[in-house]
Image (spheres, grey):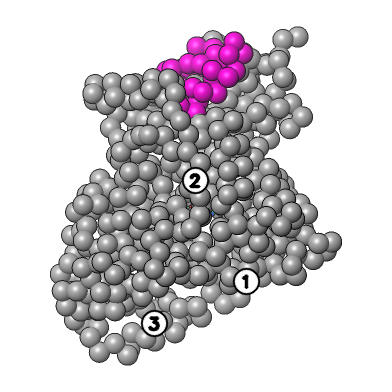
Amino acid sequence: MAPRPHWLFGDQLGPHFLAPRHGGPDDRAPVIMIEARSVLRRRRFHRAKAHLILSAMRHRAAELGDRVTYLRTETYAEGLEQVRGRRDPAPLTVRHPTSRRALDFVSARENVEVLPPKGFLVAQEDFAEWTARNKGQGKGAGAGALRLEGFYRWVRERHDLLMDGDDPAGGRWNLDHDNREPPPRGQDTLDVRGPWRPTEDEIDDEVRRDLDRWERDGEVSFVGRDGPRRFPATRREARSALRHFVAHRLAGFGRHEDAMLAADPVMSHSLLSVPLNLGLLDPAECVELAEQAYRSGDAPLNSVEGFVRQIAGWREYVWHLYWHFGEEYRHRNALRHTAPLPDWFLDLDADAVTANCLSTVLAQVRDTGWTHHIPRLMVLGSRALQDGWDPEAVTDWFHRCFVDGYDWVMLPNVVGMSQYADGGMMTTKPYTSGGAYINRMSDLCAPCAYRPTHRTGDEACPYTTGYWSFLHRHRTRLSTNHRTARAVKGLDRLKDLRELLDLTAERGDAPP
Ligand code: FAD
Ligand code: SF4
């Protein structure tokens, strides 16, 4: 009997998604890929993201050659109908998609078998078992919530990652303390080899011509600047990027992981979220290669543990929380924030912004569709939180503007981590700060027109005023949280609070 065709989504592009030994389709199964234009028409994506995803899909189709039927249609439904017929549709297999919407779509089709998910270390049933055992162990605010640290240690033990027998390598589970250093003084870049970058080919050119044409015809509209491509689009490129990172950059990953430098946006970060989320790399190979570097003495433990924590801890945790929290999670708005996103932010208009940190980071997003986790959390997300922007609109903005943004990774990171819209299901406190934190962790404040310590007057830092205004607005809720109660008490010591609140109101939603 001829094997059933297999439908491959655009974030399932690595060979492991097709391997029969990983619960995949028959290795003779014909493959179907669908480029649905309606996805791009629906929302205003970053152009570099649209380019990257189409380039990666078309590169994969070229590799699969005669085995693949590559369809360019308006919708997925139309594409499926073309290959399976309308009545009594032919059977098909598909891997568990990464978004709820896509899962509902495939589950509702007749004669479609959904194969187990791939691309993560922990199986869904194992996570369910872990949550059943660990719910309710938090303390104080957010008690009953799950916490990363326990999950991460459980993954390390279960997958024998960075373990010496029953103990964590080096005797400590958590080396965060060594990984929170400010940027090195007097340097505008880290002393580390630059990240791996690809060379474009004719497939990239073809995608760019298509995007130009669709934009010219008014079919789609994008934000941000596109090109040259900065991230892997094939398995071979993804492997090169991983090997380059581990050989040349992993050793310095830990120390300045949370620091920001204006002239060095990537610092020692891996840039591997893109190939991981496209399915071009498997998380297991990333953490295994990193561990090998530690065992052979090529990278110190703090860097390797920091990297393993990001991939085997945070990435896995976020994936499972997406499914665990359920569909209504995306609509959570515990702080009742309803302000619309201002146009300068929606348009990535960095030049309209005076605040040097925000202008610098917004320009990085405009030009590359990427910044590392601290600018995302403490500059972009913090601005939205302090100004009370609608969390659902903030989530949509991150999803559209970031090259590594997908529904599963956005919801916990933005709704939970960055906007505290879930009221503490994911984190014990809201993540936001005044200018002092940004000043300590970056070189962004020195050339800024504002002063991080000023709360009032023309030079008042919008992050400092925003921080106090936020605490004031949510005083009642935050005073009962043991992690924020002290900060709220600090409000009473501010003699200029009234003036500060007036200034915040006066500045309104004008670019800070
Ligand atoms: P590195 O610093 O080198 O870290 C290594 C890897 O760890 C990353 O490649 C990524 O795969 C993984 N990782 C680390 N933290 C997380 C996390 N919180 N969630 C998921 N994976 C994680 N990550 C995305 O992959 N896509 C997103 O759309 C995304 N949006 C974010 C939005 C906000 C507001 C915040 C605070 C974080 C977001 N993250 C997202 C997590 C993190 O910022 C990025 O994974 C990271 O910056 C990507 O760059 P990198 O590959 O150089 O990461
Ligand atoms: Fe940002 Fe304030 Fe520092 Fe300026 S002074 S860079 S606005 S934190």
Element type at mark 1: loop
Magenta range is: 55-83
Q: Which residue is mark 3?
A: 488
Residue 85 marker = none
**Whole-number angstrom distance, CA of label 1 to CA of label 3:** 22 Å
Q: Which residue is mark 1?
A: 138
Q: Can residue 284 be seen in the rendering of this structure?
A: yes
For discs 3 and 2, the disc positioned in front in the rendered view: 2
Query: Which amino acid does the dot numbered 2 rest on?
Result: Pro
The earlier-in-sequence mark between 3 and 2 is: 2
On whether ligand 1 comes within 8 Å of the CB at mark 2, the answer is: no
Marks 1/2 in contact by CB < 8 Å: the verdict is no
Q: Which residue is mark 2?
A: 195
**Whole-number angstrom distance, CA of label 1 to CA of label 2:** 39 Å
The earlier-in-sequence mark between 1 and 2 is: 1
**From the viewer's perspective, is residue 453 above or below residue 291?**
below
Q: Quadrant of residue 156?
A: bottom right
Query: Which amino acid does the dot numbered 3 rest on?
Result: Val
Instruction: Find residue 292 and report its horizontal and vertical position in percent.
Output: 72, 50
**Nearest the eye: 268 or 348:** 268
116 relative position to 363: left or right: right
**Nearest the eye: 405 or 107:** 405
**From the viewer's perspective, is residue 480 above or below residue 364?**
below
**From the viewer's perspective, is residue 142 above or below residue 42?**
below
On whether ligand 2 comes within 8 Å of the CB at mark 3, the answer is: no
Q: Name the residue located 71 percent from the left edge and 48 percent from the top edge.
A: 288
**Nearest the eye: 70 or 304:** 304
75 relative position to 216: left or right: right
Query: Crowding near pointer 3: few (<14 within 10 Å), some, many (20+)?
Result: many
Quarter of the N terminus within the rendering: top right
The earlier-in-sequence mark between 1 and 3 is: 1
